[in-house]
Amino acid sequence: MLLVYVSKITPRNRYVFKTIFKNYLGIGHALTSDLERFTSSKETKFSYLARPLGEELHFTADGLLEQNVISEKSLQTKVFKDTPTIFPVRNDTLEFDVFAATFYMLSRYEEYLPHMRDQYDRFIAKDSLAAKEGFLQIAVVDRWMLLLKQVLQQKFPELAFEKRKFKYLPTIDIDNAYAYKHKGLLRTIGSIGKSLVKFDFSKFAIQLQVIFGKKRDPFDTYDYQLSLQRKFSFKAIYFILIGDYGLNDKNLSYQNRHFKRLIKSILDYAHVGIHPSFGSNKQRSKLLMEIRRLKDIIKTDVKRSRQHFLKLSLPETYRNLLEADIEEDYTMGFASQLGFRAGTCTPYPFYDLDGEVECKLTVFPFHVMEATLKYYLNLEPDVAITECKKIIDEVKLVEGTFISLWHNESLSEEEEWKGWRKVYEEVVEYAISKEKLNA
């Protein structure tokens, strides 16, 4: 048990100390601003102030956690023990304010400041502090926790920290369950007509073969996915797009009996969550309707979510999910870059910076997406495997949770995805091998 003295208890320091000691270090703590209690206490303790009280273990406070405003920060990045740090402070054991730095990254402070957004209304990866300063592929928050742990262990060897273990969590987004099957007469005619207009006769031939049952639909990779789950003994999470048909939402109708059967079959061997449609990010009524549709199909509450197109606007998106009783979100990551958007590979509670309140929504950051590798980074499969292994090694270094994002169509071994199935297989096998090292 640790007793931490602060000049005043605020929502920010209450959140960050709770998150650090519960989610990262696994030890009990108490926060106090009662000077008499702190000085007279015989408990293991330290102060977090601008200056130390006396000879106690002390960490220098930058002041961010005592504020209740959101303002531009002129942040300086320094390297301490091979790890990039922010919020440097003088006369401190760690040479930076580890608590302010952690809060800045986990709260996504910079995403509340004025910024440009991309064509899909998303925060742009290259504009993030981590990308600009070159530490987007480093799990800095988890590394900071290791540095903090070392200091506490040296000062208080009697402290018992919870042992962390590397975990692997594969996730699959189903944006389009099938390429050609079960689309209905109008969509099928339109698709065939488009192939003919473009003189794409090879695609036209495949469409006819699939429609008449002579060939497996290219996006129907579910048996293959199940075979991998059985081979490596893991349980994935599937996020299902179930919104109405539109420009950016092209899945089957939620009323389609084949689609319903597919969803129910997936539930037999995996977890299922909602993949809110492109338009639902701005319309909570759409989100609620889509969750209700999925709930009616799977006959159980929907507690997990990941935004279609990774559309994440803070705090609005997470507020909408909270209103819909979603408990876990898996959107925290960049479409255009691999790495650690929030600087971490550890699930953590969402902090609403506008409302200055911790919320009952757990953020599960993902780190690798196959579309990033192929479309944004233009990597060949062998290079993509190497880059993924680097991220997995970083997560293993801090014993975090590695989360991958794939789509059913990218496992097809057809057309543009030919040669990419081995990327998924090697990522899964490599991550599972790291997980087995815990045994």
Image (cartoon, rainbow, N blue to C red):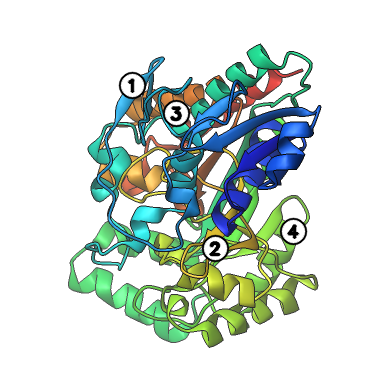
Q: Quadrant of the N terminus?
A: top right
Coordinates of residue 369 in the picture (x, y in percent) = 43, 44
Instruction: Calculate the distance from the C-alpha at mark 1 to the C-alpha at mark 2.
Output: 60 Å
Q: Are marks 1 and 3 in contact (CB under 8 Å)?
A: no
Residue at coordinates 36% horizontally, 36% vertically from top-left? 87
Left or right of 278 on screen, residue 220: right
Q: Secondary structure at mark 2?
A: loop
Tell us which disc is closer to us: 4 or 3: 3
Coordinates of residue 51 in the picture (x, y in percent) = 48, 33
Tell us which disc is closer to us: 3 or 2: 3
Q: Disc 4 marks which residue?
A: 267
Q: What's under tag 1, amino acid-wise?
A: Val
Q: Which mark is residue 213?
A: 2
Instruction: Calculate the distance from the C-alpha at mark 1 to the C-alpha at mark 3.
Output: 20 Å
Instruction: Calculate the distance from the C-alpha at mark 4 to the C-alpha at mark 1.
Output: 46 Å
Q: Are marks 4 and 1 in contact (CB under 8 Å)?
A: no
Mark 4 or mark 2: which comes first in sequence? 2
Q: Which mark is residue 407?
A: none
Tell us which disc is closer to us: 4 or 1: 1
Q: Are marks 4 and 3 in contact (CB under 8 Å)?
A: no
Q: Disc 1 marks which residue?
A: 79
